[in-house]
Amino acid sequence: DHAGLLALGEVHVLEADAHGRVEVERVLVVREDRARAAGQEVRLAMEAVDPRSLLSGHYAALRLTETGAEGAACPPGLTGAVEWIALSPRGDHHSVAGGATTREAALALGPLAVRGSAYCNDFTLPPDRGPVATGPEAEPPPAPESQPVVTLDIGIDRFYADQDEALAIETALRDAGRDGPEAFAIVSVGADGRARLKGVEIGGQRTELTWF
């Protein structure tokens, strides 16, 4: 029966294709795992976004955002076409040092360059007026200071985990305000300039990415 043989042949082709896809996916996962392990590890400040449920599981959504010092200016080069971001050590983590269109230009701004972009919002802080002075020799009110808030986009915006772990991470991030524990994304920057997430650290507690 030619129809039966044809159907059987189609099944065999589909099975072979499925096995091939699984093997390709396995190779890609191993390759990514090796690249993640070989890259330079950095800690980047982050904050939380509400987690979203997926058909394949759950994840805690992340935003790589850091508030700079009062009176500081936005990092240079973050306007216009930006393809590379310079990172520089800042205490126990790395911060955005500037943006550029080439890797070489980014490395002139900081010791580590990563593919991506960033933007900076320069918020104006209300001045600390102190006691109100009166009379002819009263000093003019102080000029308002600014405070930069830099948001980094390097292709990392979620941390996959089971539902309980994702919700626990999101809750911990919500509690990590100005007076709460610090929160960081643990990122590997490869020789190709690509950033790969390794885990998160909240209040000194590190959670490794294990879904791959």
Image (cartoon, rainbow, N blue to C red):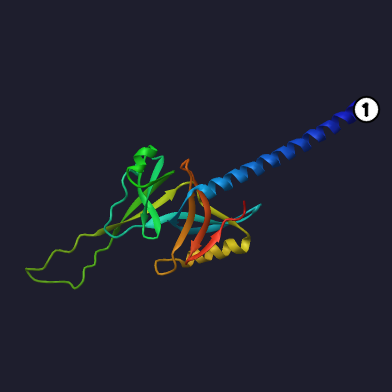
Quadrant of the frame with the N terminus: top right
Q: Which residue is at the front of the view, 52 or 193? A: 193
Question: Residue 102: x, y in percent?
Answer: 38, 37
- Neighbourhood count class around disc 1 (C-alpha, 10 Å): few under 14, some 14–19, many 20 upward: few
- Name the residue at 46% across, 59% down: 184
Q: Amino acid at mark 1?
A: Asp
- Name the residue at 49% across, 59% down: 48
Q: Which residue is at the front of the view, 120 or 201? A: 201
Disc 1 target residue: 1
Residue reaching furthest to the top: 2
In the depicted structure, whether residue 184 falls above or below residue 14 = below
Residue reaching furthest to the left: 136
Question: Residue 209: x, y in percent?
Answer: 57, 56
Q: Which residue is at the front of the view, 128 or 30? A: 30
Question: Which of the 4 quarters of the picture holds residue 208?
Answer: bottom right
Question: Residue 32: x, y in percent?
Answer: 57, 45
- Name the residue at 54% across, 45% down: 35
Q: Is residue 205 left or right of residue 102?
A: right
Question: Residue 11: x, y in percent?
Answer: 82, 35
Residue reaching furthest to the right: 1
Instruction: State how many labels appear.
Output: 1
Q: Is residue 152 left or right of residue 77?
A: right
- Name the residue at 62% across, 61% down: 163
Would residue 70 be seen by someone viewing this image from the given angle?
A: yes
Assign a secondary structure to mark 1. Answer: loop
Would residue 81 be seen by someone viewing this image from the given angle?
A: no
Residue reaching furthest to the bottom: 131
